[in-house]
Image (spheres, grey):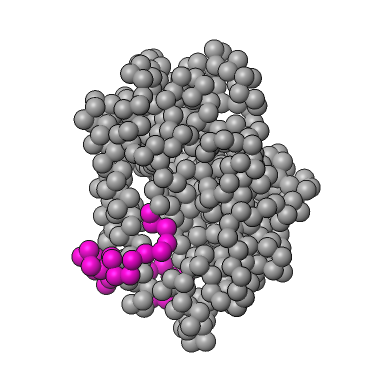
Amino acid sequence: MQRREFLRTLGTGALAGCAGLTFSRRCRAARKPNILFAIADDQSWCHTGAMGDPVVKTPTFDRIAREGALFTHAYCSAPSCTPSRGAILTGQDFWRLEEGACLWSTLPAKFAVYPEMLSDAGYHVGQTRKGWGPGRIEPGGRTQNPAGARYKGFAQFLDAAPGDKPFCFWFGSFDPHRPYEPGSGRQSGMDPNQVVVPPFLPDVPEVRNDILDYFFEIERFDREVGELLDVLEERGLLDNTLVVMTSDNGMPFPRAKTNLYDYGVRMPLAIRWPTVVKGGQTIEDFVSFADYAPTFLEAAGLKPPAEMTGRSLMKVLTSDKQGWVDPQRDKVFFGRERHTSLRAGGVGYPCRAIRTKDHLYIRNFARDRWPAGDPDVYGDIDGNSPTKTYLLDHREREDVRPLFELATSKRPAEELYDVKKDPAQMHNVAQRPEYAGVREKLRAALDTHLTATGDPRLVGGAEAFDQYPYYGSRPKWAGARSKG
């Protein structure tokens, strides 16, 4: 949809998102809110105080959850920075974004983004640090990062805002992306003995301390978002600001980031908007990152364009219910294409998935490829981290070998996990006879959604994903370990 076409819909779309609300909440929602979107860089859903982690301290996230809504089943569209952020901005499943489906790509200007739509509707829009990306905006025909004009900081952004305009601000942290300062977590006072090590990683001191360093950066992100809330409170803007705090993809550890298991795609999410959203809610509905853009537009009184595959969360946010609010939010879809270029021919690892309350089903489209990148680089696992190094250096040990295989070995065409029995998704039951009915049902549901949304993997043209330019640096050495 072109910008002028979208503007013609504003009049008829005003207050459309509030049509199903009670009268009092409809009136309160009619006032255009400010929007603060705070996004971490590589944080899995379980690593906040509100989600019960015993080590990491996240008072800001916990406050937003306590005074608003905590979502326990939010999923990125792809466990890779560029496509995940593209889905957020466009409100579309990542596979619809052409080059934008890959890391270090571009986002073609023909894909409208919610910051531009809000700007056209009178919002003051901006961003700081990591917006859309990594990638290059110029090949896509853009002159500005899709997340908005860059500002040095939040205070400078607010100082530049006209007094009568609502604002939309994207705070994109670089935390907790690697590299980490070794020992920073332990030096801050965190105890490695209290770390809950995911069962797909070796439970050794090197991994425990690596996780502490990851926690240290999560805490830094949390503090900085707290400072943004302080600025809003000082200026009397907080109560009419829709605050969203989340991450873009999972923790940068083997079998997490870039993978379609929960540690790669399941995200922390808390939303606060006290004039509209009842505090203290815990919501179990499934949320896709493509849902953010239509939510922001509807909250601002605008009608989301038809090409958005995401669905507004306004119905859930304005409900007095907890737990499962919208019966139609019983599943979510995600996938991935190319992450790094460290695979023969620079190709990616195409896969798609459907997640329900009880099961995760994954379709791997190129089972001949290495999911973590070609040996011995395994470039789709971030960097020369202590955890990756330990896994590779000790792969021949009897207790480590199965974990190394889980992270790096080639995978079958179909994977199915019973998440109630196997929450870490380590035991593929796709070929067990007792799961045949579940497998067929989920396969059909995934195919239906991918076809309806025009996924090239089903409707044709998927070869383009491996042919799009890669704008990141390409290592010139072979056989060395990737910097990720």
Quadrant of the frame with the N terminus: top right
Residue 274 located left or right of residue 477: left
The answer to whether residue 193 is magenta is yes
Q: Residue at x 53, y 28 (%)?
A: 116
Residue 73 in percent (x, y) is at 45, 47
Residue 327 in percent (x, y) is at 51, 37
Q: Residue at x 33, y 70 (%)?
A: 182
Residue 302 in percent (x, y) is at 51, 21
| Segment tinted magenta in the rendering | 175-203
Q: Residue at x 50, y 79 (%)?
A: 392
- Name the outermost residue toward the right: 460
The answer to whether residue 139 is magenta is no
Residue 482 located left or right of residue 239: right
Tell me, yes or no, if residue 186 can be seen here. yes
- Name the outermost residue toward the top: 11
Nearest the eye: 315 or 235 = 235
Judge whether 437 appears above or below 95 on screen.
below
Q: Residue at x 46, y 19 (%)?
A: 122
Nearest the eye: 23 or 91 = 91
Quadrant housing residue 6: top right
Judge whether 286 appears above or below 28 on screen.
below
Quadrant housing residue 91: top right
Tell me, yes or no, if residue 422 can be seen here. no
